[in-house]
Image (cartoon, rainbow, N blue to C red):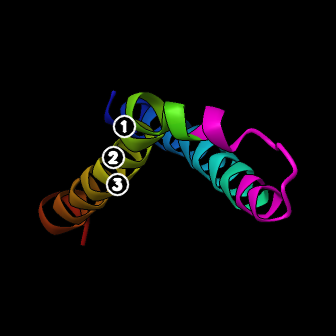
């Protein structure tokens, strides 16, 4: 049960990481496009910042911390040997 939960958490965090990386690439390209007066969706990206991208970054950070705590507790208290 614990291994299934950890595998699911790692899969969800991996997908979330790729989403956050995609949003960063979109932001960087839209920012360069804005500087060159080319519309690459900066206004759309900015409108999605608070309701979509901030929670995704927060979930990624919280999930990494939770995953680390689970691994530490597992090694500390349930290690064999």
> Disc 2 designates what residue?
58
Magenta segment range?
Answer: 30-45
Which residue is at 16% across, 59% downward?
73
Residue 9 at x, y = what percent?
Answer: 43, 37
Residues tagged 1 and 2 counted as in contact (Cβ below 8 A) = yes
Mark 3 crowdedness (10 Å alpha carbons): few <14, some 14-19, many ≥20: some
| Quarter location, residue 25 | bottom right
In the image, is 9 to the left or to the right of 63?
Answer: right
**Residue 6 to residue 5: above or below:** below
Residue 19 included in the magenta stretch of the image: no
Mark number displayed over residue 61: 3
Q: Between residue 6 and residue 33, name the one nearer to us.
A: 33
Residue 23 at x, y = what percent?
Answer: 64, 46
Q: Quadrant of the N terminus?
A: top left
**Residue 65 to residue 45: above or below:** below
Farthest front residue? 37
Label 2: which secondary element = helix
Farthest bottom residue? 81
Q: Quadrant of the C terminus?
A: bottom left
> Disc 1 designates what residue?
55
């Amino acid at each position: 049960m614990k291994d299934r939960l950890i595998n699911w958490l790692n899969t969800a965090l991996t997908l979330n990481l790729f989403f956050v990386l995609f949003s960063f690439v979109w932001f960087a390209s839209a920012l360069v496009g804005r500087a060159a007066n080319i519309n690459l969706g900066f206004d759309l990206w900015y409108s999605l910042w608070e309701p979509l991208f901030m929670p995704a970054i927060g979930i990624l950070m919280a999930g990494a911390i939770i995953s680390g705590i689970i691994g530490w507790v597992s090694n500390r208290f349930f290690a064999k040997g």
